[in-house]
Image: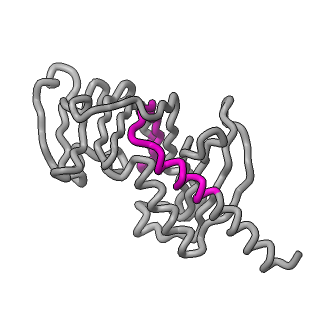
Amino acid sequence: MSGLALVLLISQDAAELLANYEAAWAGVQDYTCILTTSEKVGDKTETASYRMLYMKPGWINYTQIEGSRKGSKATYDPNTGKITASLGGVLGFIKITTDPTDSRVTSARGERMDRSDFGWILKDWKAYLAEGKVSLGGEETKGDIKVYRLVAKGLDPQKENGSARIVLYLRADNWLPYQTAHYDSDGSLILKATFKDLKLNQGLKEKDFKI
């Protein structure tokens, strides 16, 4: 098999996986999970865990259960494009409503809450595929979860918040994301996000997103 033919085959297989992802996502109305993150900022690495709720067309709720903002809560409202958040601890009664780009409601690296769900991840990867930047990385097992690995290379760090390469791990049991790993131009891991204890179509309502 020629090199070009192999590249085309790998690209086709990657497109198949993303098509499976898209079809699976079409059948999801809502989901809950535990989102764990590890972010590198300078010489420091910050870790956190959140109880995450999502409901179409874009409602997102985070409750931080581990990390520097433990106890804090935030909800993104797709109707207003705003985030309402409350601080943890003794200041938990204080609420703010602000834009998703406000540093008070972004992650350590400035990742936006409104761009953290499976729908947004799918949108990004369809764009990478259209640009010819996605290849199939094989399959493996993470814990007890079998996953397929997709790799996006040659990304513009200026546009991708420092990421030059991103790896997406899709679950073999439902074709939805299990983990994403982001690397800078030097190959250093700068962000890892893992979606654990995933539960689909739980019948969430708007009231579940109120703070």
Which quarter shows the N terminus?
Answer: bottom right
Q: How many marks?
A: 0
Let me know if residue 32 is in the magenta part. yes
Question: Does residue 154 sit above or below 49 in this rendering?
Answer: below
Quadrant hosting residue 64: top left
Residue placed most toward the observer, 9 or 109: 9
In the picture shown, does residue 36 fall above or below 76?
Answer: above
Q: Residue placed at 46% from the left, 54% from the top?
A: 121
Rendering coords of residue 36 (x, y %)? 46, 34
Of all residues shown, which one is farthest toward the top?
Answer: 90
Q: Nearer the viewer, residue 24 or 121?
A: 24
Q: Which residue: 48% across, 71% down?
A: 156
Residue at the far right: name it.
1
Query: Considering the image in quadrants, where does the C terminus appear?
Result: top left
Residue displayed at 21% across by 45% down: 77
Q: Eyeballing the image, is 174 above or below 209? A: below
Tell me where residue 153 appears, x and y as whole percent: 60, 66
Residue under the point 64% across and 56% down: 17
Q: Is residue 207 above or below residue 110?
A: above
What sort of colour scheme is used for the picture?
one colour
Residue 115 appears anywhere in the view:
yes
Image side of residue 120 versus residue 102, left or right: right
- Give the side of residue 137 with respect to residue 71, left or right: right
Instruction: Using the rendered image of the protein, determine whether residue 68 is visible from the camera's viewpoint.
Output: no
Q: Which residues are magenta?
A: 17-45
Q: Quadrant of residue 177?
A: top right
Locate residue 200, reporting x and y percent.
47, 34
Position of 121 compared to 13: left or right? left
Q: Is residue 48 magenta?
A: no
Q: Is residue 142 left or right of residue 50?
A: right
Q: Position of residue 38 (x, y in %)?
A: 47, 40
